[in-house]
Image (spheres, grey):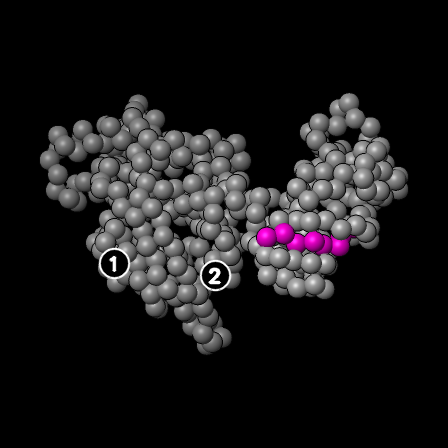
């Protein structure tokens, strides 16, 4: 691969004029630092600005304001061909009239490389992506997963410093998506190439990324490792977007900037939190459904509102002191299954609670 480079985005803004003639801000003053060799995912719902951000890094969109650096070079106004990047598209964008070898070799031929050098590079890259025996086939003779590997090979063979992915797996079926995300991560680790990946699929982001940049309405909600984003969401939006989450309301009794005593479910709990809160403030409590289990004995009484068998877990909706709470009771095979309307218990503790701002 080419020399690995970091990617820095400073005060990036992208405005559009909407169909109604009004100004629309797709990306609002974001700052990102992606280290050389890192795999970072831009994650968020449709319309959050993640694809626009990627397209600005690629050079397909010019920022309204802000700067983009690849390594030490400021590239904000450069055309895509002048940037040391390659893009893997959602649609594969293969040439239907060229075989696989020629599709992968296309960019190298434009660089006027010798035939022997092109042959050597294409052979190595097809080996890396597992397509050695398919180089003479046409794209329409390949499966979707194989076509996506060709698109990846074509991007990698150019030896860019930065590899960009625009929702590359969204056209594949669920099983193939899981296989291909593992393959992309394997190839990225093997090459060590700096990679920026866009998806709205949280499972993709969690399984592939060194870090996730979670976006919402053109702004960054949180940057962190998959573990940080899941275990310590910065906002209720992050908690709700990543995985399943119970987001319930509590009242602050006392807070010192390290621990916060809250009144919740009829008792008080001392929860680790660095938020600045005052006595009487409302705060949201995040509890993951898998952190609880429904039992015959425990420290907190509940009422079962619904009970649905889901195979690997029993899906409960409970009444917890007037608030609804979802519980995934895993491996229900040898456990008592509680029915709708029954009284039962859970164990509530500070360790499974995480606080986020009320607003």
Question: Residue 325 — which label?
Answer: none
Quarter holding residue 315? top right
> Which residue is at the far bottom?
21
Q: Is residue 75 visible?
A: yes
Q: Which residue is mark 1?
A: 75
> Does the segment drawn in magenta span residue 200?
no
Could you tell me residue 79's position as x and y percent? 24, 58
Residues drawn in magenta: 258-265
- Magenta stretch, main secondary structure, is strand
Q: Secondary structure at mark 1?
A: loop
Lower sequence index among marks 2 and 1:
1
Residue visible at 17% across and 45% down in the picture: 110
Task: Tell me the residue at 30%/34% (across/down).
Answer: 191
Residue 212 lies left or right of residue 335; in this view the side is left
Q: Say few, some or many: other residues with alpha carbon within 10 Å of mark 2 (under 14 / 14 to 19 / 20 or more).
A: many
Decide if residue 90 is in sight here.
Answer: no
Q: Which residue is rendered at x = 71% and y = 27% of the image?
A: 331
The residue at 80%/44% (across/down) is: 318
């Amino acid at each position: 691969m080419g020399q690995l480079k970091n990617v820095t985005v400073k005060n990036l803004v992208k405005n559009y004029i909407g169909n109604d003639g009004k100004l629309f801000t797709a990306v609002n003053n974001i700052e990102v630092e992606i280290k050389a060799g890192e795999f970072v995912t831009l994650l968020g719902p449709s319309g959050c600005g993640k694809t626009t951000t990627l397209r600005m890094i690629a050079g397909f969109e010019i920022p309204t304001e802000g700067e983009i650096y690849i390594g030490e070079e400021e590239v904000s106004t450069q055309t895509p061909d002048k940037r040391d990047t390659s893009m893997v598209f959602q649609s594969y964008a293969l040439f239907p009239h060229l075989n696989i070898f020629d599709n992968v070799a296309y960019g190298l031929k434009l660089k006027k490389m010798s035939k022997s050098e092109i042959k050597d590079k294409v052979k190595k890259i097809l080996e890396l992506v597992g397509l050695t025996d398919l180089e003479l086939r046409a794209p329409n003779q390949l499966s979707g997963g194989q076509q996506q590997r060709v698109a990846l090979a074509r991007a990698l063979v150019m030896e860019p410093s930065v590899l960009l992915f625009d929702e590359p797996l969204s056209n594949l079926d669920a099983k193939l998506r899981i296989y291909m995300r593992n393959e992309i991560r394997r190839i990225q680790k093997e090459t060590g190439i700096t990679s920026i990946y866009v998806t709205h699929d949280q499972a993709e982001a969690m399984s592939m990324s060194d870090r996730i940049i979670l976006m919402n309405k053109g702004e960054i909600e949180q940057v962190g490792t998959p573990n940080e984003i899941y275990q310590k969401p910065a906002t209720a939006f992050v908690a709700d977007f990543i995985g399943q989450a119970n987001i319930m309301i509590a009242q602050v009794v006392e807070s010192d900037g390290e621990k916060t005593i809250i009144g919740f479910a009829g008792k008080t709990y001392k929860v680790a939190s660095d938020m600045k809160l005052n006595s009487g403030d409302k705060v949201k409590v995040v509890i993951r459904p898998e952190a609880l289990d429904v039992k015959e004995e425990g420290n907190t009484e509940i009422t079962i509102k619904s009970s649905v068998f889901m195979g690997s877990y029993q899906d409960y909706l409970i009444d917890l002191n007037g608030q609804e709470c979802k519980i995934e009771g895993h491996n229900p095979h040898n456990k008592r299954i509680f029915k709708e309307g029954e009284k039962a218990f859970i164990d509530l503790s500070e360790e499974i609670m995480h606080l986020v701002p009320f607003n």
